[in-house]
Structure formats: C-alpha cells, structure tokens
Image (cartoon, grey):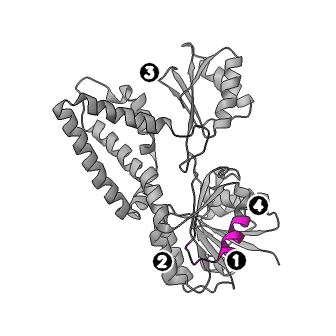
Amino acid sequence: MQTSVLIAGLGLIGGSIAASIRSAHPNVKIIGFDQNRKATEEGLRRQIIDESAENFGKGASAADVIILAAPVSVILSMIKELEKTELRPGAIVTDVGSTKRLIELQADNSLKGRCHFIGGHPMAGSHKSGVSAARANLFENAYYFLIAEENQEPAPIEKLEHLLSGTHAKFFRVTPETHDQIVGLISHFPHLIASALVHHLENHPIEGINLRLLAAGGFRDITRIASSDPTMWTDTVMSNRDDLLKLLEEWTQSMEQLKNLLAKGNGPSIYEFFRKAKVFRDGFPKKEKGAIPAYYDLFIDIPDRPDTISTVTGYIGRAGINLTNIEIIEARENNQGIMRLTFQEASQRDRAHAILRQKGYHTYLND
C-alpha cells in the first residue's frame, strides 16, 4: 500500500523535506498544505508535492505521516486541530519546531493514544525563504534532532528516520528538555546577545562619525545573526523563555565579574579571560557541520576597477557555484581582503577559492 505524507507548511523547510522524501522514496505520495495557495501551486509546479489538500484536516486524515512545518506557535495550533481530526491507524505526526517542550506537552494532551508523535527539529536553513528556494540537499550532513523519551517505541522513530533518509542528515535523539537547553545555549541566547550588541551600538552615536561604516568589519561578523527574521525569532525565544531567563541571569553575573576585573585593573585575570576563551574556541572542529547552520566566507584582494566584481562573479557563476552574498569591505579590521564572498557550503567556497587562485587573485579564508 502506498505511503501518504502530508507536509503542512510549504516554506523552505517543509518544501525541502518534501523534496528530500521525493528523492529517496519516489513512490511515496506527498500531499501539500499551506495557507498561502501560491506556495502549494509552486510546490505542484516544481513537482515537490503530488497534490494539495483542500484544508489541513482533510490532508491529515489522508496521510500516514504528518509533518508540521511551521513556527512553534502555529504548530501548537495545528496539534490542537488534530484533536478533532480522524487520523489513520498507526499515523506518525512530527514537526520541525525550534523548541520542543511546549510542543511535546501539547501533543501529550491532544494526541496521546491516537498516533505516534515524534518531535523533530532539522538544524538547517538558508538566507532564502519559501518553497521556491527548497532543495533536497538542504539538510545534508546537518543535525536533525528527534525527540525520544525513555518509554518511546523504537519502531515509529526508525520508520520516520527511513522516510527522512533522503535528507542525508545526522539524526540525533534527545529528550525535549535537553533539546531546548542545547538550542537555547548555542542558538537562541547568541541571537539575543547579537541583537543587544546592535542596539548598544545604535544607542551610542559619536558626533561626526559614521559608525555603520566602521562596524562593517569584525563587528558586522559577530552580529551577523541579528539580521535574522524578527517574527520568527520572537516566536522562538518566547517558546524557550525559561532556559533563556536562566542564561541571561548567568550572563549578567559573568559580565559583573568582568566589570569588576576591569575596575580593579586586574591585568592577569583579564589575560586569563581572553586566553581561556581562545583555547576553548580554537578547539571547535573546523571541518564538522555544527548544530547551527554556518556561512563560509572567502576574502579577495582586488584592484579598484569597475569590471572587477563582474569578472570575479563571472568565474564563479560559470563554474555553477552559488553565492549567498557579496560585500566590499572598506573597514578592514581583522580581514585580509577587501571583497568578501559568502557561500552556504564549505565545498562551494573551496571550489571558488581554487578557481580564483588559479586566475591569479590573492584569496584568503577566515575559518
């Protein structure tokens, strides 16, 4: 009997999951649902989905596996709606939400005994959004969290991992509490700090000085994530408030200690502060994909000529390499080149690096 999968939410993540399922399991029937009819039309046009559901309930009733691909607040509403939806026997329901405890609690209240609920969170993304940017290899070698409690049946999780095998992701089974601690510490909390640093800069103008121009070097790098979608991040941090409040309290205490060291002029302790940070940071694996999507930069020394950008990007484009961003750096603190090319995959960056060096350009990596 043919397996039917409902993708509820045809954005970048939902569309890419659909495409990855299609690549590994061409006989699986994929149903798409999205409040935006243009998204389902695009999914049909690209043959990412086989058909569109008239509404969420009908699509869920016709599916063996239901994948809720939406922000956390919308996922909670979808789970609530499934309370009054007739589900197929043995149905598996999963999600892609960026926090897990609230979702697991809602699923336990609404779906317990009616289906197999397996919380999920693929740790991948892109600077692009929408189903038009969906691609089957978006999750390749990325971590894909699946929620596994001690008393959870192994067979449904194994079935879901098989269905998602086309993602070529690294499945990582955790409890909802551990998941939220991990993403709170390495993703949600840094987003708060990065945005706070940007506000701090904005609130300290210096008369006659263009701080935005001068901040285009290292400051821009450490605050890059502050450019993320504010709607999505409001939804994310509000669903992980408890962990973030604890982290902010600890951060406040750490900053108070650092403030005291500076006030006392304690040079040796300040040195230790920087030394320990450097040792720990230098121990990060360079060739491994972490749990949070990364960008890969290539810096190039280029002559100041009108045709330089088109020449460089022409070499890269003709090689079939996709660029995420191009930037001319005027404030060159800590950077060796004045043109920065950003790629979503290290392999693309490395290919561009080799091509441009062959063409005689001085190029530098900044890993």
Which quarter of the rendered picture does the C terminus lie within? top right
Magenta stretch?
A: 149-163
Secondary structure at badge 3 equals: loop
- Residue at the extreme left: 264
Q: Compared to 354, does 289 lie above or below? A: below
Q: Residue at x 43, y 56 (%)?
A: 184
Residue that carries the numbered disc 2 in the rendered image: 106
Coordinates of residue 130 in the picture (x, y in percent)? 60, 54
Q: Which mark is residue 332?
A: 3
The reply to whether the C-beta atoms of the residues labelled 4 and 3 are less than 8 Å apart is no
| x and y, in percent, of residue 78 in the image | 53, 75
The amino acid on which the numbered mark 3 sits, given as a three-letter code, is Arg
Q: Which mark is residue 97?
A: none
In this picture, residue 144 sits left or right of residue 280: right
**Viewer can see residue 322:** no
In the image, which is nearer the foreground, mark 1 or mark 3? 3
Quick check: 146 left or right of 208? right
Residue neighbourhood size for the residue with mark 4, other residues' Cα within 10 Å, grouped as few (<14), some (14–19), many (≥20): many
Disc 2 versus disc 4: nearer the observer: 2
As drawn, 262 above or below 33: above
Q: Residue at x 42, y 37 (%)?
A: 222
2 or 4: tag closer to the N-terminus: 4
Q: Nearer the viewer, residue 257 or 342?
A: 257
Q: For mark 1, what is the residue? A: 63
Height in image: 208 above or below 82? above
Mark 2 crowdedness (10 Å alpha carbons): few <14, some 14-19, many ≥20: some
**Residue at image mark 4:** 22
Please tell me which of labels 4 and 3 falls first in the chain.
4
Q: Amino acid at mark 4?
A: Arg
Q: Residue 285's x, y, as percent?
A: 56, 40
x then y, percent, for residue 55: 62, 76
